[in-house]
Amino acid sequence: MQRPLCIAVSLLLAIPANAQVRNYGPLRVDLSKAKLMDEFIVVPAKNPRGQYLYIGVSCKERLFNFTGAEYKWKEWNNPETMHEAKIVADMCNQI
């Protein structure tokens, strides 16, 4: 399972960044920079105030996480909003 995911991430990195920057509610997520780290996918994002953060997704568990101040990770939870659920779905189905 990990090998096809690594291949997909490699192919995604070859696509121009503009085609992979998406808005999810208030967040702007750059899917072109998604990285597979162990069993998680991590992707950079920007909030409405222009602050950078990271979003983490566990496709196996369908969990969502993000960094707060000083890039410290919060707790892994089920997606709480429609935007978070869409991020999980897109990252798990497309990456």
Image (cartoon, rainbow, N blue to C red):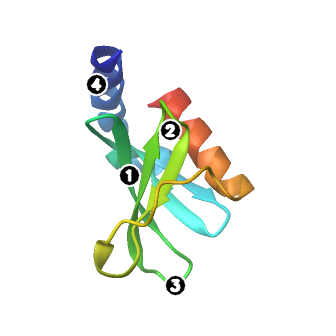
* Mark with earlier residue (2, 4): 4
Q: Quadrant of the N terminus?
A: top left
Say which quarter of the image contains residue 10.
Answer: top left
Tell me the residue at 26%/36% (across/down): 38
Tell me the amino acid under the disc marked 2.
Answer: Met
Query: On the rendered structure, is 93 left or right of 25?
Result: left
Which residue position is annotated with label 4? Answer: 6
Residue type at mark 1 is Val
* Res 43 label: 1
Instruction: Please name the residue that numbered disc 2 is placed on.
Output: 91
Q: Which residue is mark 3?
A: 49
Q: CA distance from mark 2 to mark 4?
A: 13 Å
Q: Mark 4 or mark 3: which comes first in sequence?
A: 4
Q: Secondary structure at mark 4?
A: helix
> In the rendered view, does 28 fall on the left or right side of 95?
right
Q: Give the amino acid type for the residue marked by disc 3 in the picture.
A: Arg
Position in image of residue 59 (x %, y %)? 48, 34
**Tags 1 and 4 touching, CB below 8 Å:** no
* Residue depicted at x 66% and y 47%: 85
Q: Is residue 64 left or right of residue 23?
A: left
